[in-house]
Amino acid sequence: MLKLEYILIGKLPKTERDMLLENLRTERECGRNVLEWDSAKKHIQEEKRVEGALAKERFAEKVFAEKAILVSGDAKELNEAQRIGMAALCYLMPGDGRTQRNEAAAGEMEVTSPADMYAEGMEEIDGSFLQHVYERHHRIPWIILKTPRCIVKEFSMEYLDALFELYAGKGMTDYMEPLYPYEEEREYQQAYIEQMYRFYGYGMWIVCDRNTGELIGRAGVEHREELGGELELGYAIGVPWQRQGYATEVCNAIITYVKEELMLPSVSCLIETGNVVSEHLAQKLGFHYCETVQIDGKQMRKYKVAFY
């Protein structure tokens, strides 16, 4: 199983380096080593000398790269990390025409140095953030949050069959869209993982039992075109787990996550007229009725909670 063991620091301005090191003070307590990039290269070279043959040398590089992440503002270092398959966070050097950022004619940002994510400052870069970058590089689903009974995390394809079983429950699609046919849904979910999660860092997640790992529902937030791009909360709890407080537990945690982690100003929900249970839940969660709108021929009641 892949595990982040080394955080490598490449070329950074002194102020950014000092800030990053301060943020990473506790990483050694978590069993991670914080090393300079040059020291890490020596470490790899030592492993190569032990391995000997070229194929084994490359294997040594790969093994080390799989356990590490590089933070750097240097294109050469970032290219080397990419060559050996290492996760990387690129610091965007301000006002340096030789580095990673150029303003395109259309006003869009063109990034030329390879990395999994990019940062303009180290203020919020800590071990938890780098763990997420590492997981994204290796396509490891993010654990979004935990509640007393549940784990909310990104969907992964191993749960596809369980998702179909969940949606087959009696009444599950009375007030929400069913899944696509199996192969179409598989393609949709694969694209969703690659695009939605990677671009936004959030979306519709899965809800699993904290003790057994069993899929018990879905919940999450997405931007809704019909709401002018506002964030919409959605949820679905499987029939065997309904009326046991799971929806309240999970949705409360997600609302807190939107406010404190995503730092977004509000979240809305759309509830089809007649879905009294979901309306009661929305009110219990602190949502307030705004208006009734028609979407795809259905009367939808819009609720909203504002944080700021």
Image (tube, helix red, strand yellow):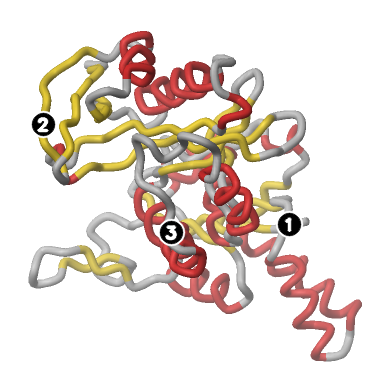
Residue at 38%, 50% in the rendered image: 119
**Residue 18 seen:** no
The N terminus appears in which quarter of the rendering?
A: bottom right
Cβ–Cβ under 8 Å for marks 3 and 2: no
Mark 1 and mark 3: span between their CA atoms? 22 Å
Viewer-nearest of labels 3 and 2? 2
- Residue 293's disc is 2
Q: Position of residue 165 (x, y in %)?
A: 60, 47
Mark 3 and mark 2: span between their CA atoms? 44 Å
Q: Is disc 1 placed on a helix, strand or loop?
A: loop
Local crowd size for mark 1, using a 10 Å CA cut-off: few (<14), some (14–19), many (≥20):
few
Mark 1 and mark 2: span between their CA atoms? 47 Å
Front residue (pair 59, 182): 182
Please say if 277 is above or below 233: above
Q: Is disc 2 placed on a helix, strand or loop?
A: strand
Front residue (pair 221, 87): 221
Residue at 49%, 22% in the rendered image: 247
Q: Quadrant of residue 38?
A: bottom right
- Earlier residue among tags 3 and 2: 3
Residue at 50%, 69% in the rendered image: 183
Pointer 1 residue: 2
Which amino acid type is shown beneath numbered disc 2? Val
Which amino acid type is shown beneath numbered disc 1? Leu
User: What count of labels does the image hold?
Assistant: 3
**Residue 41 seen:** yes
Q: Please state if 291 lies on the left or on the right of 66 as rendered.
A: left
Which amino acid type is shown beneath numbered disc 3? Cys
Local crowd size for mark 2, using a 10 Å CA cut-off: few (<14), some (14–19), many (≥20):
some
Residue at 58%, 39% in the rendered image: 143
Viewer-nearest of labels 1 and 2? 2
Please say if 51 is above or below 33: below
Viewer-nearest of labels 1 and 3? 1
